[in-house]
Amino acid sequence: MSLEAEIAAARAVAAEYVGPGEDLVGVIPAEPAGVRVYVCGYAQDGDERWLALDSEGAPVSDRALVRDAVSIAALCELAEESAGGGDITALRAGLAELRVTENPDGIEEAEAAAAELEATLVPPPRVATIAYLDDLGRAAAKLEQTLGESGASPFAAAMKTGLAAAEELAARVERSYKVPLD
């Protein structure tokens, strides 16, 4: 079954949990520790509710698994938004222009690293996994090194800040989860 079909199936099950006046606003596949989970978001008048479904469509009640799924999904999204300054297409265009106008030493390596980062980014839909997060981190670090970043990595700084945001999101999910958590 394709990922699109899996998400559609999870969305159909998640729709069964929509409360009065509530909308299902998203289904995000995540795979913490190799276990597929679909994190489902619901909204009503600015309030949010959450439910995670397992690969069989059953609600996940394992608190740790829910937290891990939410955290890895949030961190993958942040990594995609932060890698290469957030706009890899513009970065690649800027590097190409720099090669033509100034042709500095190392520009080919920087262009290759930017192309590698772009190839690492998986277009939606995709599954949020630790391996994907690691791949993005490696590609972003390689790009930063070829660009001569000295000192703290902008990507690492964004991810460090994002850890707190991912933890806060996981806590919000726990507080507004649709079924009891173990």
Image (cartoon, rainbow, N blue to C red):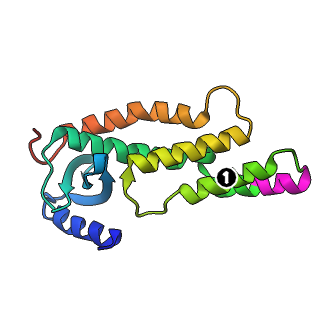
Give the x, y percent position of residue 69. 29, 46
Q: Nearer the viewer, residue 125 or 20?
A: 125
Residue displayed at 19% across by 56% down:
54
Q: Which of 64 and 82 is in front in this view?
A: 64
Residue ID for mark 1 = 114
Amino acid at dot 1: Ala
Asked whether, in this view, residue 36 is left or right of residue 159, the answer is left
Identify the element where label 1 is drawn: helix
Residue displayed at 15% across by 42% down:
62
What segment is highlighted magenta in the picture?
Answer: 94-102
Give the x, y percent position of residue 57. 16, 62
**155 to 112, vertically: above or below:** above
Give the x, y percent position of residue 171. 26, 34
Asked whether, in this view, residue 107 is left or right of residue 31, the answer is right
**Image quadrant where one finds the C terminus:** top left
Residue displayed at 15% across by 50% down:
60
